[in-house]
Image (tube, coloured by chain):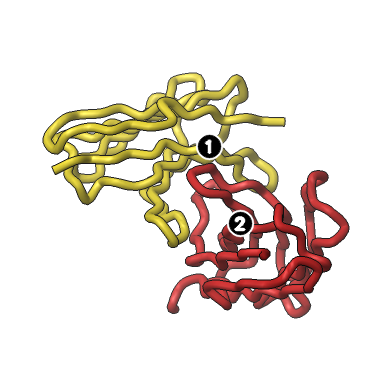
Chain colours: A red, B yellow
């Protein structure tokens, strides 16, 4: 297993455009998480899935954000009508059902909105 | 809402010095994790502690979970420039996601 894979690593987009990121988790992990992180800060929770079911979505998350995990394997995170404030590192992580053993993170997707 | 507060926020030391980073909460966690993150990369899990009072050692790093499972510390002995990075703690409960602290930025100067 090659760990958690995120694509693309970097994305530069113009304000108002839509962007989509992909995450491939560790195959044995049935939980998948999306977090957002700004420079020098801790990760901020966005949403998570157990298999294909989206179990929780942050109340801070705008309706412009949507995530899917259609077959319980890879996941996509879409941001519509991007704003400059969306510029951040978007991190994907996966874990077994018991997240108390910690996450395995991907390398992240760095989004810059210009 | 469960919050984790890390201190200090920034730490700049010379090679060979010792340091301790703290992670505190008013909530009880069933587990606590420590991660290290380098610029442009995702966090890498260092350790998970699950038992109150538990101490784990990883080479020059010593991790402790508080007796009441509300706090944890990370102690580094004889810091090296390769220890430079963002150190994050996270806490887990019996349901769902982990909660992260805001991180401690450590710089070790040669």
Query: Which sits in the foreground, B78 or B15?
Result: B15
Image quadrant where residue B88 sits: top left
Query: Which sits in the foreground, A33 or B110?
Result: B110
Residue A74 rendering spot, x and y as whole percentages: 66, 77
Query: What secondary structure is found at the residue carrying circle 1?
Result: loop
Residue A83 rendering spot, x and y as whole percentages: 76, 59
Query: Which sits in the foreground, B17 or B76?
Result: B17
Q: Chain of mark 1?
A: B
Q: Marks 1/2: CA distance?
A: 15 Å
Tell how many labels. 2
Image height of A104 relative to B21, above or below: below
Query: What secondary structure is found at the residue carrying circle 2?
Result: strand
Query: Which sits in the foreground, A77 or B110?
Result: B110
For residue A41, say whether it is visible.
yes
In the drawing, does residue B13 fall left or right of residue B71? Answer: left
In the drawing, does residue A86 fall left or right of residue A106? Answer: right
- Which numbered disc, 1 or 2, marks the residue closer to the eye? 2
Residue depicted at x 30% and y 27% = B20
Image quadrant where residue A36 sits: bottom right
Q: Residues within 10 Å of mark 1 (few under 14, many from 20)?
A: many
Which residue, given by chain and number where applicable, does mark 1 sit on?
Answer: B102
Quarter of the image containing the C terminus of chain B?
A: top left
Which residue, given by chain and number where applicable, does mark 2 sit on?
Answer: A88
Residue depicted at x 60% and y 73% = A11
In the drawing, does residue B79 fall left or right of residue B46? Answer: left
Residue depicted at x 64% and y 76% = A22
In the drawing, does residue B47 fall left or right of residue A50? Answer: left
């Amino acid at each position: 297993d090659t760990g958690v894979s995120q694509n693309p690593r970097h994305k530069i987009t113009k304000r108002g455009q839509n962007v989509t990121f992909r995450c491939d988790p560790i195959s044995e992990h049935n939980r998948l998480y999306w977090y957002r992180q700004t420079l020098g800060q801790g990760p901020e929770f966005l949403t998570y899935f157990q298999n294909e079911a989206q179990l929780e979505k942050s109340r801070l998350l705008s309706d412009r954000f949507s995530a899917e995990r259609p077959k319980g394997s890879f996941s996509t995170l879409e941001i519509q009508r991007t704003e400059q404030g969306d510029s951040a590192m978007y991190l994907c992580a996966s874990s077994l059902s018991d997240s108390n053993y910690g996450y395995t993170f991907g390398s992240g997707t760095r989004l810059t909105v210009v | 809402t469960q919050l984790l507060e890390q201190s200090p926020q920034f730490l700049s030391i010379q090679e060979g010095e010792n340091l301790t980073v703290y992670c505190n909460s008013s909530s009880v966690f069933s587990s606590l994790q420590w991660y290290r993150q380098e610029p442009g990369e995702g966090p890498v899990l260092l350790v998970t502690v699950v038992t109150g009072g538990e101490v784990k050692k990883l080479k020059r790093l010593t991790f402790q979970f508080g007796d009441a499972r509300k706090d944890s510390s990370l102690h580094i002995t004889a810091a090296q420039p390769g220890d430079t990075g963002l150190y994050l703690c996270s806490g887990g409960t019996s349901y769902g996601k982990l909660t992260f602290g805001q991180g401690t930025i450590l710089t070790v100067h040669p």
